[in-house]
Amino acid sequence: MNKHDLQSKLKEVNSLLLQYNIVNNTINTIQKEIDLFKAKIVFVGSFNAGKTALINNILGGDEILKEDISPQTAIATEIIYDSNEQIIRIKKDGTQSICSINEVDNLSTEGFEKYICTLNKNILLQFPDKIIVDMPGFDSGIEAHNRAILQYISEAAAYIFVIDASKGTLSKSSIDFLQEIQEYSQTIKFVLTKCDKIYSKDITSIVENLQDIITGITFETPDILCVSSREAITKDKMISLISNLSVDKLLLQKFGEKILIQIKQEEQSLITRLENINFNSFEIDRSIQKCMQAKQSFENAFRQKKSQISNKLHNEKATLIIQDIEKDLHSQITSLITSAQQGTESFNETINSILRKSFMKSSQRYIDEMYDDLLIYLEKISQKDISIDSQDVADTMKKTVYALETILKSGKSFAKLKKYNSIYKIFSTGLAVTTSIIAPWLEMLIIFLPDIISLIKNLFGESKEENLRHEIENKIIPEICSRLRPEINESMNKLEEQMINELYEQYEKLIENKTNELKKLQAEKNMHITETEEQKNNLRKSIHRLNEISKEIETSIN
């Protein structure tokens, strides 16, 4: 299914819904996003792996993007076509400044989020719906790398993972980063650079070794493209690699799940109308009253549960996250010692990499558990007569929870990746939540980490391993956990608010959809403008067609 087909399906969905005066603003927003969609193809790799050289090769061979830069000056750079060549420098607050390509090397990157490089290169016209992104290396300094990874981990449509052949294998930082991004992207392509520096017979051995390592992480054996920036054929190889990345497939990966959930919600609205179409105006009015009672009962029960969730997040889950972080730091003690012996910058980078991955993994796991627990609780209160005067109201709540579960199950049915196996990640913006709340305390960590490291500064470099081990385990790690605790509590506040609000809004929307459909049906009956059997047949056809469209999109995703 291509972009045009997907937009056509969405227009058909909107047309079906308009027959019943239903306007889905989320679908309308998605349609606009699809129109503007450009797949960001992000080049990643360790510092000096050859990412920028590859991109320069694609652009024609000239050193358009400076290759021999220091780690401190590295910044994420998007490359797009424009007849007016310039660099647009974007700050964290969104403000922009423009400079020429020639003068950018003399300007500081400090305070800037990313650059957009506009080039009058015809080759870019071959990728009209793609944006090439040059990322700082894994070891290009903590701040630059954190800024870039947090920005693009939710924006990247695909990754080009660049590996230096002269290294012979994947570095620890490369393995860590691959483990991280494979949780968020289905499309990662691997390129082995500087192959001209290695004997041909050794290339085969290196490729096989890399395939074994990567397969152990992604559970898929990758194709690895072997290139050298000195070879003319490299340009053709890279252009072919990028051209073969299907924008339509990447588009479906980004929007497919959201679309299916919205269609399933509206399908539930039409089912409500069909179920109640034989009621007279009095019965419909009674059903509306039951919906309103169910909503009030739900709000009361939800308020009680929210307090419990808040206590659990702050008193239990935050502590568990700290324990996970402490455990992960201790489990990586050998890497910490090795990086400490290489200097403070290396030590900073290693700690930051461990903490970022540990927090994202741990917080997401506990939020998943809380979200699942909350939905189970809603199901239980819908099955019991808790603070509900009428069994009819309990039935209304039960049906609403069932509708919610139906939507969630439809998400699970097409979710292929591990990251979509939990209710929270299917149903909410789980990834966006995690990346948005993690940035502030990582930035804070950058500030206070040098202060913590100063506790053992004199031990760096020449110190014996046992001394470093003792100081890291007994001073650095406890101090980091102590400093992070208030920040993680604040993160839990934001996660709690996002999680609760998302489920509440979806549950409330289902009840409101049910109520609105009943009100519309009541108005139609009062005006005697519908023929019941004809309307029922039209509804059945609309419901059936929405179901067919869902299956067509689902098939395309899979």
Image (tube, rainbow, N blue to C red):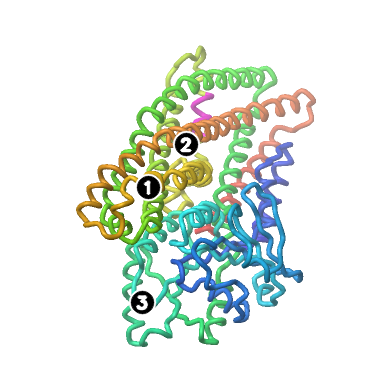
Between discs 1 and 3, the one toward the N terminus: 3
Which span is picked out in magenta? 396-403
Quadrant assignment, res 182 = bottom left
Q: Which residue is mark 3?
A: 207
User: What's under tag 1, amino acid-wise?
Assistant: Ser
Helix, strand or loop for the magenta stretch, by majority: helix
User: What's under tag 3, amino acid-wise?
Assistant: Val
Q: Position of residue 295 (x, y in %)?
A: 57, 22
Mark number displayed over residue 358: 1
The quarter of the picture where the N terminus appears is: bottom right
What is the secondary structure assignment of the residue under circle 2?
helix
Label 2, label 1: how many angstroms apart (C-alpha)? 14 Å
Q: Which residue is mark 2?
A: 491
Instruction: Decide: few, some or many residues near mark 3? Use Cα within 10 Å; few <14, some 14-19, many ≥20.
Output: many
What is the secondary structure assignment of the residue under circle 1?
helix
Residue name at image x 49 percent, y 59 percent: 558
